């Protein structure tokens, strides 16, 4: 039988003790609520479906996010030199919107509302990443903090936004000539070499900005990338890329392109504006690089993945049609 006792004018404490289960207690404003809760807990214990909700009710999402950022994330995500780790921004957005709720209160309806509200201001890809981060945080609560989630992981039970259509922006020959001219006019001497290296190597922006000279083997024409989005890898360097690196001024820091991310962003944006080029981002340079490699027709998808650093071949399917065109020309015995 449950024990219910008055703790104050508007406080009623209910206690449920049953052999084989941890003691349960909770305080309510009315005796009726205390009795209803006690009866529910006893019934669940009797039917063998009881789940201890106490830790989940006492812990807020904000508290778990704080623990995640201190105890888990720093040891599982590589720290960027500019301190702009994506996971930090994702955790901040999640904490701002959901931090006040307890883990026990988090359900599909609440997460779906967060998803829909975020889709009004940011793209679907951003929302997908934030939802996956929330799922990872909840898994951390279960495995590392030993907190049972009464509803399981509600993120698994809601619809995720579809991935946005992949960008396919490539510059025409005339646009490339204008971009080259404006980049060379820039007061920043590293802008045009950085653009060239991005196209020649297919490196991500952060990989390019953290590449050090000690990780470049000029004789073997290989650049070793350690601070990458996926995992460490070796990137082959074309003769053009080698020549660019050899002609770059040597910086004290030892970094090949000693620029801050936002500095590069602003000077590149300014060059595009002067060249009257619209809707072209730095990441489009990586797409240009991989498109050019695919258009050669002599590289397999596996070789393309070795250069790009993609974990799965699924990410490279968009480039296979470019290879197919070259193969069709081969079948027709046309010169390539």
Image (tube, grey):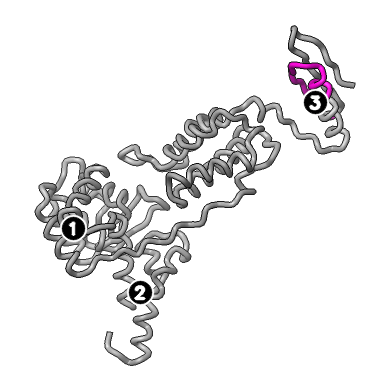
Q: How far is mark 3 from mark 1, CA to CA? A: 67 Å
Q: In front: mark 3 or mark 1?
A: 1
Q: How far is mark 3 from mark 2, CA to CA? A: 66 Å
Place residue 48 in its image quadrant: top right
Q: Earlier in the sequence, mark 3 or mark 1?
A: 3
Where residue 197 appears, as percent x and y from the top left, is 23, 58
Residue 313 lies left or right of residue 183; in this view the side is right
Task: Tell which of 208 and 177 is nearer to you.
Answer: 177
Position of 223 relative to 107 (above/below): below
Residue 268 lies left or right of residue 35; in this view the side is left
Q: What residue do we see at 45% from left, 40% from top?
A: 90
Mark 1, Cα crowd under 10 Å, few <14 / some 14-19 / many 20+, is few
Mark 2, Cα crowd under 10 Å, few <14 / some 14-19 / many 20+, is few
- Image label count: 3
SS at circle 2: loop
User: CB under 8 Å between callouts 3 and 2?
Assistant: no
Q: Quadrant of the N terminus?
A: top right
Q: Quadrant of the C terminus?
A: bottom left
Q: What label does residue 276 carry, if any?
A: 1
**Mark 2 — residue?**
299
Q: What residue do we see at 45% from left, 34% from top?
A: 92
Where residue 221 appears, as percent x and y from the top left, is 24, 62
Where residue 57 appears, as percent x and y from the top left, is 67, 27
Q: What label does residue 238 carry, if any?
A: none
> Where are the magenta residues, as a range?
20-37
Task: Tell which of 142 and 62 is nearer to you.
Answer: 62
Whether residue 32 is in magenta: the answer is yes
Where residue 64 appears, as percent x and y from the top left, is 56, 31
**Mark 3 — residue?**
37
Q: Earlier in the sequence, mark 1 or mark 2?
A: 1
């Amino acid at each position: 039988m449950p024990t219910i006792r008055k703790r104050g004018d508007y406080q009623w404490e209910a206690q449920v003790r049953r052999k084989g289960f941890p003691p349960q207690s909770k305080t309510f404003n009315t005796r009726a609520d205390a009795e209803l809760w006690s009866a529910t807990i006893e019934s669940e214990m009797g039917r063998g479906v009881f789940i201890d909700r106490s830790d989940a009710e006492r812990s807020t999402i904000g508290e778990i996010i704080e623990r995640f950022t201190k105890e888990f994330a720093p040891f599982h995500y590589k720290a960027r030199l500019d301190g702009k780790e994506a996971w930090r921004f994702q955790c901040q957005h999640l904490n701002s919107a959901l931090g006040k709720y307890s883990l026990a209160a988090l359900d599909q309806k609440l997460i779906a509302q967060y998803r829909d509200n975020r889709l009004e201001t940011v793209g679907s890809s951003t929302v997908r990443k934030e939802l996956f981060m929330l799922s990872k945080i909840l898994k951390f609560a279960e495995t590392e903090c030993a907190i049972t989630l009464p509803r399981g992981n509600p993120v698994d039970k809601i619809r995720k936004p579809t991935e946005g259509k992949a960008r396919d922006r490539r510059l025409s020959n005339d646009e490339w000539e204008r971009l080259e001219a404006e980049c060379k006019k820039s007061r920043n001497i590293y802008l045009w070499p950085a653009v060239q290296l991005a196209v020649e190597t297919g490196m991500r922006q952060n990989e390019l900005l953290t590449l050090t000279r000690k990780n470049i083997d000029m004789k073997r024409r290989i650049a070793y990338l350690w601070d990458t989005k996926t995992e460490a890898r070796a990137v082959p360097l074309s003769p053009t890329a080698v020549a660019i690196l050899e002609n770059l001024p040597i910086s004290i820091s030892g970094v090949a392109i000693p620029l801050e991310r936002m500095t590069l962003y602003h000077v590149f944006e300014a060059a595009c504006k002067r060249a009257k080029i619209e809707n072209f981002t730095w990441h489009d340079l990586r797409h240009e690089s991989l498109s050019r490699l695919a258009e050669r027709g002599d590289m397999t998808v596996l070789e393309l993945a070795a250069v790009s650093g993609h974990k799965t071949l699924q990410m490279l399917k968009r480039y296979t049609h470019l290879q197919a065109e070259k193969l069709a020309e081969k079948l027709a015995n046309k010169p390539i």
